[in-house]
Image (tube, rainbow, N blue to C red):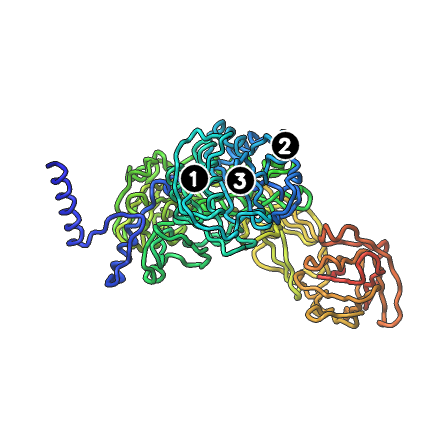
Amino acid sequence: MKKIFSISIMILLISLCHAQNIHPFLNTIKIEQNDTYNDIIEKAAHVVPTPNQMTALQDEFIAFIHFGPNTFTRKEWGNGTEDPSVFDLKSLDTDQWCEALKAAGIKKVILTAKHHDGFVLWQSRYTKHGIMSTGFRNGKGDVMKDLSESCRKYNLKLGVYLSPADLYQIENPVGLYGNQSQYTNRTIPREIPERPFLNQTKFDFYADDYNEYFMNQLFELLTEYGPIYEVWFDGAHPKTKGGQKYNYSAWKKLIRTLAPEAVIFGMEDVRWCGNESGATRDTEWNVIPYAENPDTASSFPDMEAGDLGSREVLYKGKYLHYQQAETNTSIREGWFYRDDTYQKVRSVDDVFDIYERAVGGNSTFLLNIPPNREGKFSKIDVAVLEETGKRIRETYDTDLLRNAKGPNKVLDGCTDTYVILPKNGNIEIATLTPIKINRILIQEAIACKGERVEKHAVDVWQNGQWKEIASATNIGYKRILRFPAVQTTKIRIRVLESRLESAICNVSAHYYRTRAPQLDYSRNIQGMIKLFPRLQEFNWKKHNENAVQNLNSGYTIYYTENGSEPNKNSKKYEKPFWMDGGQLKAVAIINEMQGPILSEQIGFVQNNWQLLSVSDEQVGHSGNFAFDADPTTYWLAVGKKNHYITIDLKKDNIISGFAYTPAKGYPKGGLSHGVFQVSDDGKCWEDIEVFEFGNLKNDPSKRFWYLKKKVKAHYVRIKSLGDGNEGELAIAELDLF
């Protein structure tokens, strides 16, 4: 009788919801054919993350570990035919990995247990193509086991990447991938008598050989290394064979059963952000439309568009689904370790900036740190991780609103409590004493109320009135607003646009200690110089963000043009200025802290120079590009040695030296050896000095040559002496001073 009564009450409640147009809170909601635009937006406001998704969002900062044969071959992708012995590992220190990750504030680590080459990093029962066929610990080594033990020691969650693509199984004559085997009923795991499983769970799936192989290995990883919190799949296919299909519905059932706390990346739980550079969207909605039901789909295409969840995009869907973004990139130029000399590492500024943009932009930050050939993180990587973690703690462990007056449900530090705001509502918070802030953190109660805020702003009380200091679009799980430091006793959060009444569960205020940045400069063809924070040189999947500029505000730049040391009494930089030769020095200063000094020899203004002759010009690489004040263009000559370029300076100049900028896009054409010549009439030439520049291929930085004695010239010629540049010459810029 009680059961019948409960069912009756449930039916009555559902009927009342439909009658009052009340929507239930679900992970996926279907759009009906007769839904109006208002209905669709109201449904979108009722889409919520699953408990596993919510936990994954709260992890915030997580790590990727790419390790395998590529670490030793120095390749990004292997071909599957590598002899396992190339994985010449002698030592392994996963404790060192986890200690560094913990110092960074990372909460979860995902190991590439098998990359596309098919080589496995654990003692699998189902293949010999892996660590068991190497000399590491006499074939008994197990990276997954070591890492799982270290994760328990350092209280880190463990995840696993198992590549669906498998080049070893493709290239091997008896490989299972695409062998066109019959689909039959298979029991997972397939028993290996000499190595029984402690976990006795059994699955019966309709599968072919490769899907059986894949799920046998998935079973091993999910049952023998402790709890798994993320299973990572990608769609990369370096090569396919035989029309191989993946039985994702079977994989999902296996994962949901054996790893009930795990989210699945690349499928319905977590999606790729659309790039591998660390770029983030200004508006990252996690409630997004689907053309088919994602709960039953087996294919999830990459979503790379700039707009994934605006109202206009939602109107086009058939299902609304919560699927959070993971912002993934590498700390190094590439996913795998190559070397510590030429493979650049991201700066602390860059990593911390991505952290604030990703975590503070409604996504999770997944940072790859590849171990080196000694089985450790390199010292430079560890230093970046440690300093990043230090900055995170310094900035966000202290909430400057801890003792403030305002709605307790947004100030109690608990995301389970919240205040409901109307579509144009606001929250006011007052502090007992003035506070200095440059970060505001806001969170919506998405677990129970979904994503709703579409636009918001932050004001502070100054000089007897409210002043807006920051604004943004959505909030979602977390929004971090960054702005120049202000001092105030009152803060106001205004919701400007919202899909329904919004639920704000947390507001906190923070201060990031601004650093005085290293400066850089540019000069155009007219001689106008700009000063700005130096952008880190990182030549891999660029995100086009200036991390130093994003992080640091409120500093002042001072400069000199005569080589003297700049200080607060020097010229203040406010706008571009003209400079025709001389020694430029500049420095940024904030809060009595001085950054590194920029020192640069500035050449003569080039706008009146004229190209007289060159030995050769390739299409698209005119000789004029050698002095156009644009280092991204270059003059290119090929086909013989002793190339030359002749320039009319249009007036007599006293020259003390020259600068040569190599063409970074054309390393073969380095000006390694040449002669500097001058002329009064452009006909009779005098050799002034022979010069040499070494290691241009590995270090294509700007080079300077100072003459032993100043010379007067109306015309100059740079002539290559032909050795070391393979009969080719490329010059991005020539400067005279």
Mark 3 = which residue? Answer: 113
Q: As shown in the figure, which amino acid type bears the numbered disc 2? A: Phe
For the point 72% across and 61% down, the residue is 733
Mark 1 = which residue? Answer: 188
Q: Secondary structure at mark 3?
A: strand
Q: Nearer the viewer, residue 612 or 197?
A: 197
Q: Secondary structure at mark 2?
A: helix
Q: Secondary structure at mark 1?
A: strand
Mark 2 = which residue? Answer: 136
Residue 646: tell me if it is visible.
Answer: yes
Tell me the tag on residue 380: none
Number of residues whose C-alpha sits closer than 10 Å to that of mark 2, classed few (under 14), some (14–19) or many (20 or more): some
Check contact, mark 2 vs mark 3: CB within 8 A.
no
- Residue 270's x, y, as percent? 42, 47
Q: Nearer the viewer, residue 524 or 384?
A: 384
Eyeballing the image, is 53 above or below 199?
below
- Residue 595's x, y, as percent? 61, 43
Residue 400: tell me if it is visible.
Answer: no
